[in-house]
Image: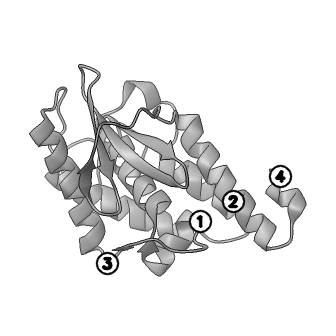
Amino acid sequence: MRRKAGDPCSNCCKAIPSVLKFTAAPLIYLRILDLEAELGVSTEPHKETLDRLIEEAGRTIQVKGTYTREDAVGILRTIDNVIRSNGLNLRSVDGNDLFHKGLGSKKVDCDDTSFIYLSIADALGLPLAAVSAPQHIFARFMFNNRSYINWETTSAEVLSNDYYLKNLTRDGIIATAYNNRGKAWTRKGNLIGAGG
C-alpha cells in the first residue's frame, strides 16, 4: 500500500507530517504516474523510485512550521542533492514529455525535476508550489508571510523574485501532466486518447 501524507516512513522513525490542504488526496506523484499508466505503460518501478527519493530526503530535511530563507535554500539544495545522488541527470530533454520516461532514462527536464521537488514537498508537508512559465516550470518555496523564493529545479539556484507568475494549484499541476500525456497520445497517432 502506498503512503499518503501523514503515514509513517518505512525506513525512518518519524512520521511524514500531513499537509492540511492535501490530507485526503493521494500524493502528487501517484496522480501523475497513474495518469501516465493510462498510456499502457508500467509506472510501478517509478513509484518505487520516488518513494526512495522521498525517504532519503525525509531523513535529512527538518520539517517545521516556519522557515527562514536559509532554511528554505538548505531544503531545496538537499532535494537537489538527493536527485543528483540517485543518478538523475538534470538537463533539457527534447521530446521527454512524460514523467515516467524521465525517471526511467534518468534524463530529466524541468517538468520532471519540478515534479520530483513537488513530490518530496507533498510527502513531507513542505510549502512548495509549482510555477508555470512559457515553455518552462519551476518551484516556489512559500513563507508564512507570503514572501517566497523562486527556485530553478534544473540548475539548483535561486531565481529572481521579479516573476509575477501565479502558483499552480494542485489541479494545475495535474493539468500539466494531462497536457504531457496528450502529447504522448498524439505522437502515438491516437487523437481520441490525446483529448482525454
Percent across and percent down for residue 174 are 59, 44
Residue at 26% of width from left, 59% of height from top?
156
Q: Is residue 180 left or right of residue 143?
A: right
Mark 2 and mark 3 in contact? Answer it, CB < 8 Å. Answer: no
- Give the label on residue 181, or none: 2
- The answer to whether 110 is drawn above or below residue 30 in the figure is below
Q: CA distance from mark 4 to mark 3?
A: 34 Å
Of the two numbered discs 4 and 2 on the same chain, state the one appearing first in sequence: 2
Q: Amino acid at mark 1?
A: Leu
Of the two numbered discs 1 and 4 on the same chain, state the one appearing first in sequence: 1
- The answer to whether 57 is drawn above or below residue 171 in the figure is below
Q: CA distance from mark 2 to mark 3?
A: 25 Å
- Residue pushed farthest front? 162
Percent across and percent down for residue 78 are 19, 56
Of the two numbered discs 1 and 3 on the same chain, state the one appearing first in sequence: 3
Q: Amino acid at mark 4?
A: Gly
